[in-house]
Image (tube, grey):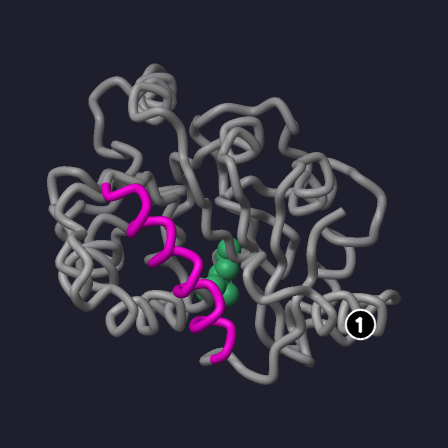
Amino acid sequence: MAEVVIVPDRASAGDLVATEIAALISRRPDAVLGLATGSTPLPVYEALRARLAGIDVSRVRGFALDEYIGIDPAHPESYASVIAREVVEPLGLTPDLIRTPPADDADLATAGERYDQAIRAAGGVDVQILGIGTDGHIGFNEPGSSFASRTRVKTLTRQTRADNARFFDAIDEVPRHCLTQGLGTILEARHLVLLAFGEGKAEAVAGAVEGPVTAMLPGSAIQLHPHVTVVVDEAAASRLRLADYYRDTFASKPEWQGI
Ligand code: PGA
């Protein structure tokens, strides 16, 4: 089962995950990070600034989960721009080693396959950071996505577009399509770390961790993976039936084990 860690706040979540990632990069300077966008991973990237001080990050590689189709890569809300601004620049990563799905590719029918090949050629993702949508999506795999899906074009749900409208001037500006890693792609990462904060995510988190494994809640795909860490605040944990068990388990875990 997923390890569930209930933390007091976002900063604690960021510290916990950043500590793990910094340790990974120390032992493997060319580690492959799976990068997520949105508000959720920001505390991890913020905590990494301090944790990576003095560690050589010049060889770190990264693959973003998804990218909007139909906006200029230079648009401030394209995920290429977001990853450059929130991750690559502040952490001092090497831009050429960090990729986002090529959603502006002239041949979108094969762009996903080529992205998956690039991930494989890099040796696979060591640690994949994930958020979860209020509709249960991970990456942009909306409800109904196949657990075997690969990187491909998806249509965003109305709910996702409404949720992401805060990043744009108007909901009509939120793209309707994206190129997203598939659930099958995500499940190949060696370690999945799913973060969620706030009451609005409680239902999706409970479904992903404890609900039936169903394509109707794509986050439930994490139950098929052998190494998953779910890091949530109290509000996002509020619908977990086994919350006390998760608390007891983490409290009695030896520190050297990490997550
Ligand atoms: P958020 O999005 O981090 O902005 O809440 C999460 C997601 O859609 O996966």
Tell me residue 205's x, y (percent): 70, 60
Instruction: Looking at the picture, tell me which residue is in the foreground, 36 or 168.
Output: 36
Tell me residue 74's x, y (percent): 13, 51
Name the residue tied to disc 1: 248
What residue sits 72% from the left and 44% below the top?
A: 220
Q: Which residues are magenta?
A: 12-29
Residue 154 in the figure: left or right of residue 121: right
Residue 113 in the figure: left or right of residue 62: right
- The kind of residue tagged 1 is Asp
Instruction: Looking at the picture, tell me which residue is in the foreground, 91 or 179.
Output: 91
Judge whether residue 23 is colored magenta: yes
Q: Identify the residue at the far right of this view.
A: 241
Tell me residue 46's x, y (percent): 31, 73
Vertical relation: 13 (above or below) 257: below
Residue 64: name its quadrant: top left
What residue sits 79% from the left and 39% below the top?
A: 213
Q: Secondary structure at mark 1?
A: helix
Judge whether residue 24 is colored magenta: yes
